[in-house]
Image (spheres, grey):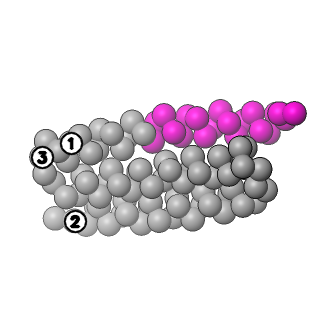
């Protein structure tokens, strides 16, 4: 049975997937046009954040892992993705 919390998680993760996927797509498309390595790193960083949200949600909703495990996966990949995004701001 899907609770209100589960439904809220599904809606939020879907929004993150759509919006994060869009940012990733446009950053990598811009990299393809310009060849600027910072745009490649930016796209990679947002891609990692987006995949983290997806994997965290899937682990909880589909695989049946605890909510704590899903949050841990999401948080770890979000931290890594943000690290790559920060790196992208310093790449020349």
Q: Looking at the image, is 88 positioned above or below residue 14?
A: below
Q: Looking at the image, is 42 positioned above or below residue 12?
A: below
Question: Does dot 1 land on a helix, a strand or a loop?
Answer: helix
Quadrant containing the N terminus is top right
Disc 2 marks which residue?
91
Label 2, residues with CA under 10 Å away: few <14, some 14-19, many ≥20: few
Camera-near label (3 vs 2) is 3
Question: Does dot 2 land on a helix, a strand or a loop?
Answer: loop
Label 3, residues with CA under 10 Å away: few <14, some 14-19, many ≥20: few
Residue 76 percent location from the top left of the image: 57, 65
The residue at 28%/44% (across/down) is: 27
The residue at 76%/55% (across/down) is: 65
What residue range appears in magenta? 1-20
Disc 1 marks which residue?
30
Quadrant containing the C terminus is bottom left
Relative to 45, is 80 on the left or the right?
A: right
Q: Looking at the image, is 80 positioned above or below residue 26?
A: below
Q: Earlier in the sequence, mark 1 or mark 2?
A: 1
Q: Looking at the image, is 49 positioned above or below residue 16?
A: below
Does the CB distance between marks 3 and 2 fall below 8 Å?
no
Q: Earlier in the sequence, mark 3 or mark 2?
A: 3
Does the CB distance between marks 3 and 1 fall below 8 Å?
yes
Considering depth in this image, is 89 or 51 the residue closer to the camera? Answer: 51
Residue 28 percent location from the top left of the image: 27, 45
Q: CA distance from mark 3 to mark 1?
A: 6 Å
Q: Main secondary structure of the magenta part?
A: helix
The residue at 65%/46% (across/down) is: 58
Which image quadrant is residue 72 in? bottom right
Camera-near label (1 vs 2) is 1
Residue 34 marker: 3
Residue 83 marker: none
Q: Which residue of the protein is positioned furthest toward the front in this rendering?
A: 63
């Amino acid at each position: 049975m899907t609770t209100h919390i589960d439904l809220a998680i599904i809606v939020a993760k879907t929004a993150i997937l759509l919006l994060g996927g869009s940012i990733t797509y446009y950053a990598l498309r811009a990299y393809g046009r310009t060849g600027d390595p910072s745009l490649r790193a930016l796209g990679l960083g947002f891609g990692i954040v987006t995949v983290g949200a997806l994997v965290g949600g899937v682990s909880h909703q589909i695989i049946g892992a605890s909510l704590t495990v899903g949050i841990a996966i999401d948080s770890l990949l979000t931290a890594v993705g943000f690290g790559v995004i920060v790196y992208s701001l310093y790449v020349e």
